Image (cartoon, grey):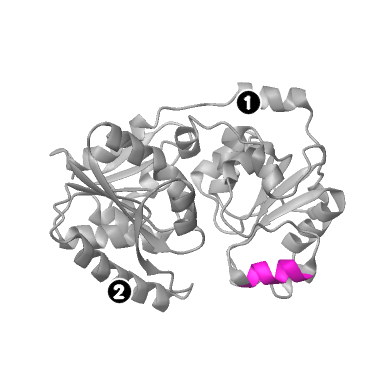
Amino acid sequence: MRVWVDLTNSPHVLVLRPVIENLRAQGAEVEVTARDFAQTVALCELHGIDATVIGHHRGGKLTAKARGLVDRSIAMRKWAKGRSFDLAIGHGSNDVNVAARLLSIPAATMFDYEWATVQHNVNCRLAQAVVVPQAIPPERLDRYGARGKLRRYEGLKEEYYLADFEPDPSVLGELGLSAAEPLAVVRTPPAVSLYHRFENSAFSDVLVKLREQGQVVVLPRTEEQRIELQQAGGFVIPERAVDGPSLVALADLVVSAGGTMNREAVALGTPVLTTFEGKIGAVDEELIRTGRMGRLEDPDQVELVRRSQADEAASSASRVRRDPQLLVDLLLSARSPLAS
């Protein structure tokens, strides 16, 4: 069996790494493509994934996204034609689903946030299998054309791809951090620039408060954010891709405007606050409702203190580790005659 895996954003490298490894261990030939966006390519290199780089991010405007979808899908089709793939896999990758449909290749898509309307209207209609957490009510996905295609799994996707993970303390030394001092890891909002926000926004107030309480590693999404944070001073900003899960596991607090890093913190037992300002998805709704993740509404909520060794040991012992082979099986079901 020949399988094509497409990676379009940094978190997808970690999510699909065990899928790629398990498929190869079972004798499948797997080829990987990657979009040059954020740290996707650098993380492929860090994790030993040989990927063909095709296309780049075109910006946040809808017209730019549409142009990027068309251009990259055409380039992907050209690359994949004649390679005789039996299955295409992506995590929210529109491009691979469009190219796969043009080449009559069965496709499977994954995601765990249900309100990305444009993206899901493409992926759910084109894919033969839609792999999502059980926390998402199926009726929320019907409007995207997912009915009859859902393949649902228990828990968080992070509990699957981090199943074999153990934190590497060397990441602290790599970044010049002290294991004895409180550490916060922060992921910025997806805004193109933090201009003016660093002085005025609630998120900026959180950064300032954390900086006063201990060590703060900030993972910016864009070069503009990186420059602004460097000018502000007082933050540790990695110059290259780092072992993010180890950093999260060793932190005393994670504050993120995104989704994946928050859920990594939950899976690894690190206290986490979300600053996500969009419509909350079902997975995060459940994590907030059950107290596994907090929602940051006031910067005064933030308190950075060093976790005790007993707390860290308890977090490690309570980790939920799920077999990623289940995700592989659900993705492979796209080739089943039962798939609609």
Q: Is residue 49 above or below residue 37?
A: above
> Where the C terminus falls, by quadrant?
top left
Where is residue 173? Give x, y as percent. Answer: 71, 44
Tag 2: amino acid: Asp
**Front-most of 275 and 323?**
323
Where is residue 3? Give x, y as percent. Answer: 23, 46
> Badge 1, how many Cα within 10 Å: few under 14, some, many 20+?
some
Q: Is residue 250 above or below residue 302?
A: above
Give the secondary structure at mark 1: helix
> Where the N terminus falls, by quadrant?
top left
Q: Is residue 228 magenta?
A: yes
Give the secondary structure at mark 2: helix
**Front-most of 193 and 249?**
249
In percent of the image, x 34 and y 30: which residue is there?
Answer: 325
Residue 316 bears which disc, if any? 1
First in sequence, mark 1 or 2: give its number.
2
Tag 1: amino acid: Ser
Q: Is residue 116 magenta?
A: no
Residue 71 bears which disc, if any? 2
**Front-most of 58 and 115?**
58
